[in-house]
Image (spheres, helix red, strand yellow):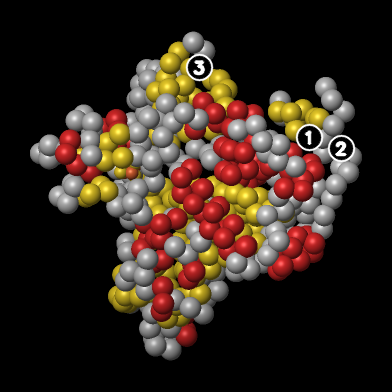
Amino acid sequence: MERDEQVWWGVRYPHKEAKVKKRRTLAEIKEKVEKGAAVVMTADELCNSVRSGEDVSFEDVDVVTSATCGLKSGTFSVLSFKVAEREEFERASKVFLNGVPAFAGPCPNERLGIIDAIVYGTSRRDEKYGGGHLFRELVAGEEIEVVVETVEGRRIETTTNLEEIPFARLCGTRNAFKNYYAFVNAHEDEVASIFSVSKFEGAFKELTFSGCGELNPLEKDPFMDTIGVGTKILMNGAEGFVIGEGTRSSAKKPNLMGIADMHGMLPEYLGGFRTSAGPEVWNSWAVPIPVLNERVLENAKRLDEEIQLGVLDVHNRLPVGEITYADVWRDCDLSVRFDEHKCIECEECQVASICPTDAFDVMAKEVNADLCCNCGACVRFCQEGAFYCNLGVVTLSGREIPVTLRQSDRKRAAKLAEMLKRKILDADFTLSEPAGRL
Ligand code: SF4
Ligand code: SF4
């Protein structure tokens, strides 16, 4: 092994302690941005340059913008808003927003007619609608129904929208994973799972996965050399902050906790995602990686081919194999296409009932691009071939297993990374020094 390399959980990285000859400070990068002289590359652009054989050196890039978009179960919102006049009730006992149960409090200030409510992205009204759907509708400016049951036995019914909610924050308790896992069902029996949109078929008939591979923030900065407490991010298009490591974060599988104001968010970057085990929530992060030294750049240059993707059995989450993100993202289509001429208007459209984001309107024969997360489920369920996407086939222990579902949208992640790049170059997003290390 080279002295400047280390093997960390089976992966070769530039050594954490390796001597780096070339360095720059964040202040120097910010000065270059102000002068219009900084080079900002998206992770996509950087990796494509490396892949095409270009020698991207320290002098060639000042900032890399990374991103991820996909299912993030540990997401919740905190909302504070008026539901009644002062003194109308003492305390709320139950709160429902569009039928999704919320937790009243923790601050019991309801005598003011204001409730504080916490809504989990995974809370559900029914099998089709949950917190993730609610968040998206709020961000899209839609009116929502509010029901408050009080300790006095009163029931207050009203409506509101994001404009009327002065405090609305989205918080990820375990977001931006350093990539995730792929899943197969190693047993014969089908199983309901958050990792499939219909019962997960076995044995080894399909593979589903999450993670944006070489675009992922913690793959670009695996030692958190630049990402820390207080790092500014874009969460669903709005400025937010990393507030620490997320729950169950570990050296092998780190993840981040972050928060952002919902008022600046864009609805195309978040929403609900229906799985065979109920509704889930998806959202998107973009994180700037200032290239402070050569090692930061070397890590940021890592490609899908070098990034492991563990394959787990969906029953017990035990490992059954290992592939790389190149197996699921390279030589595949990022977008799903719909050909209305191939749609024969079946009596019961399988796609309309299975599409996890309700993106397909069978009456209008249209896919809502803002809702479609390019998961690929429709490709399998439309027998007429009206949907097309090469999702790829993975070889695992000699078996060829088709990819049937992607729970991350790399195309959207790339779009958010591009947005962050533009904002940095336009001085619309200021790079920040972390207030604390992770
Ligand atoms: S299943 Fe396919 S062909 Fe049938 S209505 Fe749906 S999209 Fe059209
Ligand atoms: S790829 Fe197909 S199934 Fe997935 S969200 Fe888009 S239309 Fe729906």
Q: Position of residue 385 (x, y in %)?
A: 23, 31
Image marks 2 and 1: residues in contact by CB distance under 8 Å:
yes
Q: Which residue is mark 2?
A: 18
Compare residues 333 and 126 and report the one nearer the observer: 333
Does mark 1 have its CB less than 8 Å from ligand 2? no
**Residue pictured at 23% horizontal, 43% vertical:** 352
Q: Tell me, yes or no, if residue 59 can be seen here.
A: yes
Front position among marks 3 and 2: 2
- Which quadrant of the render holds ligand 2? top left
Helix, strand or loop at label 2? It is loop
Image marks 3 and 1: residues in contact by CB distance under 8 Å:
no
Q: Earlier in the sequence, mark 3 or mark 2?
A: 2
Q: Which residue is mark 3?
A: 396
Q: CA distance from mark 3 to mark 1?
A: 29 Å
Q: Which residue is mark 1?
A: 14
Does mark 2 have its CB less than 8 Å from ligand 2? no
Answer above or below: position of 271 versus 399: below
